[in-house]
Image: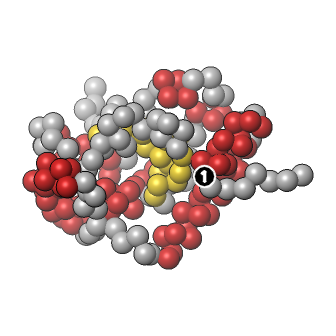
Amino acid sequence: MSDVYSPVPELNLLKEFEDSLGGRFFAPGFELFDYDLDLDWFCGDAPDAYLDRLIPFAYATSSGSYYALWRCDDRTDLATLPVVFFGDEGDLWVEASDLRELFRSLAAEPDDHEDRARLAPARERYLAWLWEHFGLTPGDSSDDDEGVALAEYTRRFADWVSEFAPEDLLDQVLSALDLETPTA
């Protein structure tokens, strides 16, 4: 039996790092959970064709929101798949174009002063880990190419969800993604 966390080397490195922190957090609310956890817990009665394209891997907030890789195509390098945020209150968006972009965003300094103080030691270790393993620094939200890529993934994600969602749910999804409901 293998003790490898996942088939994604980047997530395995992150799991190893997270385990080294002894239960401390390096980013507000972020915590890996069992890789490819059964989505029935998250998505209820969604069709298998929908569930088969989502790979949940981490809590995004302490209130139950989570991140999942979205199999938007059949690429074999799972680390290059877009990361979708599923909010516990219905929020939904494409968070990152790939895992490395998510890792950069997790490195951002928390807005909340108490979080900054509480997370500072582990965050400093995370910044060093991020640089050592990937040569990355915290993300810069002004990257135009990144914004264009996220907008394209968001449009594709909405198109994909429309294959499965009944009209009322699709309206909610499009609203959460800040997209217009198409008119006939």
Callout 1 secondary element? loop
- Residue 125 pos. (x, y %): 13, 56
Q: Which quadrant of the structure image shows residue 169?
A: top right
Q: Where is residue 40 in the image (x, y as percent from the top left)?
A: 53, 24
**Observer-nearest residue: 134 or 114?**
114
Query: Residue 153's quadrant in the figure?
Result: bottom right
Residue at 43% from the left image edge and 43% from the top image edge: 67
Q: In this view, does 124 lie to the left or right of 142?
A: left
Residue, far right:
184
Q: Residue at x 62, y 23 (%)?
A: 45
| Residue 83 falls left or right of residue 5 | right
On the rendered image, what quadrant is the N terminus found in? Answer: top left
Which three-letter amino acid code belongs to the residue tagged 1? Leu
| Side (left or right) of 175 relative to 184 | left
Q: In the picture shown, does residue 58 fall above or below 116? A: above
Q: Which residue is nearer to you in this view: 67 or 183?
A: 183
Residue carrying label 1: 177
Residue occupying the far front of the picture: 113
Question: Residue 145, percent across and down?
Answer: 51, 75
* Any part of residue 73 in sight: no
Taking the spot 80% from the left edge, 53% from the top edge, the residue there is 182
Q: Is residue 25 visible?
A: yes
10 Å neighbourhood of mark 1: few (<14), some, or many (≥20)?
Answer: some
Q: Where is residue 170 in the image (x, y as percent from the top left)?
A: 71, 41
Work out whether 128 lies above or below 34.
below
Left or right, residue 159 beside residue 44: right
Picture mark count: 1
